[in-house]
Amino acid sequence: MTSNHDYVLYNKNIEVQQQDEQEIMQKIVDSMARVNKLMYEKYRHAIRDAHAKSHGILKGELHIYDNLPEHLSQGIFRNAKTYPVIVRFSTAQSSIVPDKMSAFRGMAIKIIGVEGEKLLPELADAITQDFLLVNYPIIPTGTIKEYLKMQEGIESQTQNGEFVQKIAQKAAVGVQNVLAAVGLADDTNHLSAPGPHILGDTYFSMAALRYGDYVAKINVKPLSKNVKELAGKKVDEKIMDEDENAFLTKIISDFFQTGTAEYEMGVQLCTNLETMPVEDGSVQWPEEESPYQPVAKLIFRPQKTFSPERRVYADDVLSFNPFHCLPEHRPLGNIMRVRKLAYETSSRYRHHMNAQPRVEPKSIEELPD
């Protein structure tokens, strides 16, 4: 068991600016903006530049565990408390594609009732905080240089809609495939079939964030027996064949007609910046050096998960940003720093083009049934 003094303490020198970082970040965001405009012309509606497609919008509760030890009792986890949450399940592509396509899945968590000044100046007084998770422990494009290669490759092919879908599917499997698809690497991996049941996945922050006095990654994994049983379970072929475009929406909706699900949030604290780097999100932190330690429980009770009102609220009204948080949970590393600008740029464009205000809820009752 790791003792407290083995954990790396947070300080501002943990992060190291990369060569030409601002220029590279601006190129990435500018490329994303151009693709966003093309997607708007395609759908006549502005969508997110990542995780564009929702599959379920859930009302739940986050229960912070009592009597956490000092190294876990940090930031929002300092005191035992129950917070209402809104959770959006999604897939990672920047376009609306069939559910049968292999893809990373996302779990975006908006916690309501979080007191304290937030990191983003324009949302400093909001009482919400976001955690953005994906069902993969790392970011394959772990640095902004690698991400720029992928993004510019995708943009160069966006006029060909069929090729865009090919790129999006390759992106779900790994960056090597993406670079290969745009001629920047050898094609070394085969595309996988659609993943297992979305409710049985474990979700990760992928890159590092500040955890109060420490540095960490977080995850959310199945806890109750009924969702543990879905981990790795293939979706029924009949359900996929009935509607290859929306079967993920259906299986979430069907589950929560009567089902209650529990998940556990864990924290993996950094113990060694050499083996657990902050500036390269493609490196998986070894759990044998620092296992995930439980800090909270998520509970979702029976509900309608994809009513038209909920979908519009989540897709057009709400925004999620990893930098919308208490300073104690600031995202770390160059791949996270570019996300700050990218998410804000995309959000402004989406809300403007759809003529929808950006809203940070003050109560869970604002989420439509």
Image (cartoon, grey):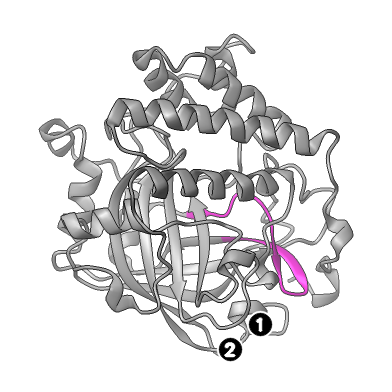
Numbered label attached to residue 73: 1
Q: Residue 92 sits in which quadrant?
A: top left
Q: Nearer the viewer, residue 318 or 99?
A: 318
Q: Which amino acid, by three-letter code, is at mark 1?
A: Ser
- Residue ID for mark 2: 79
Q: Earlier in the sequence, mark 2 or mark 1?
A: 1
Numbered label attached to residue 311: none
Badge 2, how many Cα within 10 Å: few under 14, some, many 20+?
Answer: some
Q: Residue 191 sits in which quadrant?
A: top left
Q: Quadrant of the N terminus?
A: bottom right
Magenta region includes residue 206 = yes
Q: Nearer the viewer, residue 7 or 212?
A: 212
Q: Which amino acid, by three-letter code, is at mark 2?
A: Asn
Position of 275 with respect to 242 (left or right) is right
**Total marks in image:** 2
Q: Residue at x 57, y 18 (%)?
A: 153
Q: Nearer the viewer, residue 125 or 277?
A: 125
Confirm whether residue 231 shows in the render.
no
Location of residue 163 with respect to 291 vertically, above or below: above
Magenta residues, start to end: 203-218
Residue 257: x and y in percent read: 14, 64
Which type of secondary structure does the marked residue at label 1 adopt? Answer: loop
Which type of secondary structure does the marked residue at label 2 adopt? Answer: loop
